[in-house]
Amino acid sequence: MTTAVRPPPPARTPSTKHLEWTADDLHIRYKPMTARTLLGSDSHWPQFFSIMKALADRIGDQTVRLVVAFD
C-alpha cells in the first residue's frame, strides 16, 4: 500500500514501532504486525484454536485440519 501511495519517510527504520505521515489527502499510519497482534487474546483466534484442540482430543489430532481457500 505504501508504494502505491508514496514510500514512508526516511525516519522509518527496522526498529520503528509507530510512524504516521500524510500523502496528499491520505493519512497513513505504520504499525508493525506480529503474530501476537493477529493471533493474540484480543482476537477470535484463541477460541478457534480451543475448538480445534477439543476436536483433536476427541477424534485424534491426525484428523483435524484447517483448510483455507482464497478466491
Image (cartoon, rainbow, N blue to C red):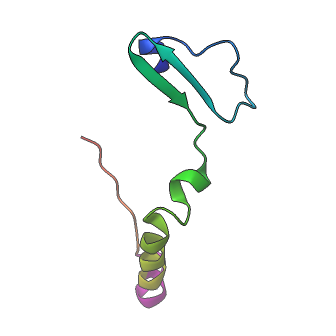
In depth, the one of 35 and 30 nearer the eye is: 30
Please state if 20 lies on the left or on the right of 71 as rendered.
Answer: right
Please state if 9 lies on the left or on the right of 64 as rendered.
Answer: right
- Up-down: is 37 above or below 45? above
Placement of the C terminus among the 4 image quadrants: top left
In which quarter of the view is residue 32 placed? top right
How many marks do you count on the picture? 0
In which quarter of the view is residue 63 placed? bottom left
Position of residue 50 measured from the top left corner of the image (x, y, whole percent): 48, 78
- Up-down: is 35 above or below 22? below
Please state if 3 lies on the left or on the right of 33 as rendered.
Answer: left
Position of residue 5 measured from the top left corner of the image (x, y, whole percent): 43, 13
- Up-down: is 40 above or below 1? below
- Reply yes or no: does residue 57 show up in magenta: yes
In depth, the one of 34 and 20 nearer the eye is: 20
Which residue of the protein is positioned furthest toward the bottom in this rendering? Answer: 58
Position of residue 61 measured from the top left corner of the image (x, y, whole percent): 48, 78
Position of residue 54 measured from the top left corner of the image (x, y, whole percent): 45, 84
Q: What residue range appears in magenta?
A: 56-63
In depth, the one of 32 and 25 nearer the eye is: 25
- Reply yes or no: does residue 60 show up in magenta: yes
Q: Residue at x 41, y 86 (%)?
A: 59
Q: Residue at x 68, y 12 (%)?
A: 10
In depth, the one of 36 and 68 nearer the eye is: 36
Q: Residue at x 56, y 52 (%)?
A: 37
Q: Residue at x 57, y 42 (%)?
A: 33
Which residue of the protein is positioned furthest toward the right in this rendering? Answer: 15
Placement of the N terminus among the 4 image quadrants: top left
